[in-house]
Image (cartoon, coloured by chain):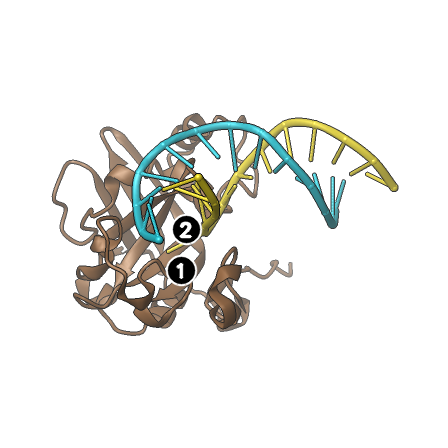
Chain colours: A brown, B cyan, C yellow
Amino acid sequence: MLVLQREFFTRDDVVQIARELLGKVICTSFGSDFTSGIIIETEAYAGIVDKASHAYNNRRTARTEVMYGRGGHAYVYLCYGIHSLFNIVTSVEDNPHAVLIRGIEPLMGPEIMLMRSGKQHLHSKIGIGPGNVSKLLGIHVKHSGLDMCNRDSLDGIWVEDRGLIVDEKEIVVSPRVGVDYAGQDALLPYRFQWKKKKETT
DNA sequence: CAGTGGATCGTCT
DNA sequence: GACGATCCACTGG
């Protein structure tokens, strides 16, 4: 098992990183609560030239400031007043790229996830949707700015490579969700989903 | 099933 | 003062 290091996130190609994050394992440790899940859906947000990005046109505010930092930090923001959406900042300082984590398959800490979600069972779609991802993993806007490569507080968020193999043919590429305002950029193929083939037994 | 609308609040204009 | 990188319950067919 290998915790993804800074070098993974500071690369320049955010679309490639979004693709490579499929099959990796996102882990959180808050207090005594440890949970993790396999990343099965991501979206790339390609910085100041991407109309769908919060950092489009080099817009720099208190909220988006963490995206301008080094890759490997968490960018979490509030959406629709309800949902904390979790992104991983990529690329180098002053190049505000990010990958939105849109779906996980629960791995560790199922009881904790049930508590957080208020659900009775971990049905198959429980981890689909960026709002649900944060809910299951316990990620909150207050965690925005956390370093995912060097723990800088008791709270921890990191990504592990557990050697899961994602076949290229199992990756579904499509336009991003909910970014109609982005004009032509809404059509970019920046959404990646890992759809495992059924075992042929 | 598909379609619709309410929840709810930080952020930016 | 408007609105969103969403979710879910509820409706009707």
N-terminal of the pair, mark 2 or mark 1, is 2
Check whether the beta carbons of the residues at disc 2 and disc 1 lie within 8 A of each other.
Answer: yes
- Please identify, in this view, whether the residue under mark 2 or under mark 1 is nearer the observer: 2
Give the quadrant of residue A50: bottom left
Label 1: state its secondary structure.
loop
User: What amino acid type should be assigned to the residue bearing mark 1?
Assistant: Leu
Residue under numbered circle 1: A164
User: What amino acid type should be assigned to the residue bearing mark 2?
Assistant: Ile
Work out how far the residue at label 2 is from the one at label 1, CA to CA, in angstroms: 9 Å
Toward the viewer: A23 or A118? A118
Asked whether the viewer can see residue A165, the reply is yes
Give the quadrant of residue A140: top left
Q: Residue at x 41, y 58 (%)?
A: A23
Q: Position of residue A131 (x, y in %)?
A: 44, 42
- Numbered tag placed on residue A132 in the rendering: none
Q: Position of residue A17 (x, y in %)?
A: 34, 67
Name the side, left or right, on which A175 lies relative to A46: right
Q: Position of residue A139 (x, y in %)?
A: 32, 39
Query: What chain does mark 2 sit on?
Result: A
The answer to whether tags 2 and 1 share a subunit is: yes
Q: Quadrant of the N terminus of chain A?
A: bottom left
Query: What chain does mark 1 sit on?
Result: A
Residue under numbered circle 2: A38
Label 2: state its secondary structure.
strand
Toward the viewer: A196 or A148? A148
| Rendered position, A181 above or below A25 | below
Q: Quadrant of the C terminus of chain A?
A: bottom right
Label 2: few (<14), some (14–19) or many (≥20) C-alpha neighbours in 10 Å? many
Asked whether the viewer can see residue A80, the reply is no
Name the side, left or right, on which C1 lies relative to B1: left
Give the quadrant of residue A35: top left
Toward the viewer: B8 or A155? B8
